[in-house]
């Protein structure tokens, strides 16, 4: 369960959950007050699976799930920089991923469709990163 109109951190987190934790995971949207009552909240203020310290939600999930995948670590840096814009990581891919997700959000009205289409971007990014090694 997460907030409506997903963007980079929520889309990437849903991708991570489905790819590395639960391939059958279902995602839904609710305001922050209802998220905990309707499912397991993520990227919602105060959620266990949310921003903690300097970490965005994606980074929190990587740590909690114990994922030790080099490509996931690169994606975590891209998501962090795109979401937080704090200069902690210098990933050239961040700008392109940000534009792609913003474009999807501008052209996709339904949150569920936006989430699914956005997760396809992360499938592609994960595949391309394999070729770079």
Image (spheres, grey):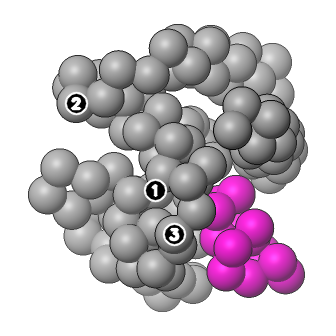
N-term mark: 3 or 2: 3
Mark whose residue sits in front, 1 or 2: 2
Res. 116 mark: none
**Image quadrant of residue 20?**
bottom right
Q: Is residue 17 above or below residue 36?
A: above
Q: Position of residue 79 (x, y in %)?
A: 47, 38
Q: Nearer the viewer, residue 47 or 71?
A: 71
| Residue marked by disc 1 | 58
Asked whether 59 falls inside the magenta stretch, the response is: no
Magenta region: which residues? 14-31
Q: Is residue 27 above or below residue 25?
A: above
Q: Residue furthest front?
A: 133
| Residue marked by disc 2 | 88
For label 1, the SS is helix
Residue in the picture at 81% in, 18% down: 107
Q: Is residue 93 above or below residue 12?
A: above
Q: Is residue 117 in view from this perspective?
A: yes
Q: Nearer the viewer, residue 55 or 38?
A: 55
In which quadrant of the rendered image does the C terminus lie?
Answer: top right
Residue in the picture at 72% in, 31% down: 132
In which quadrant of the rendered image does the N terminus lie?
Answer: bottom right
| Residue marked by disc 3 | 68
Q: Position of residue 82 (x, y in %)?
A: 43, 27
N-term mark: 1 or 2: 1
Q: Residue furthest left?
A: 53
Q: Is residue 80 above or below residue 116?
A: above
């Amino acid at each position: 369960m997460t907030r409506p109109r997903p963007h980079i951190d929520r889309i990437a987190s849903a991708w991570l959950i489905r790819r590395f934790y639960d391939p059958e995971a279902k995602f839904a949207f609710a305001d922050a007050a209802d998220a905990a009552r309707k499912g397991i909240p993520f990227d919602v203020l105060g959620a266990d699976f949310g921003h903690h310290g300097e970490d965005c939600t994606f980074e929190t999930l990587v740590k909690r799930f114990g994922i030790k995948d080099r490509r996931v670590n690169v994606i975590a840096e891209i998501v962090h920089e795109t979401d937080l814009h704090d200069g902690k990581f210098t990933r050239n891919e961040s700008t392109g991923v940000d534009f792609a997700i913003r474009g999807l959000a501008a052209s996709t009205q339904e949150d569920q469709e936006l989430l699914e289409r956005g997760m396809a971007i992360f499938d592609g990014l994960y595949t391309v990163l394999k070729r770079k090694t």
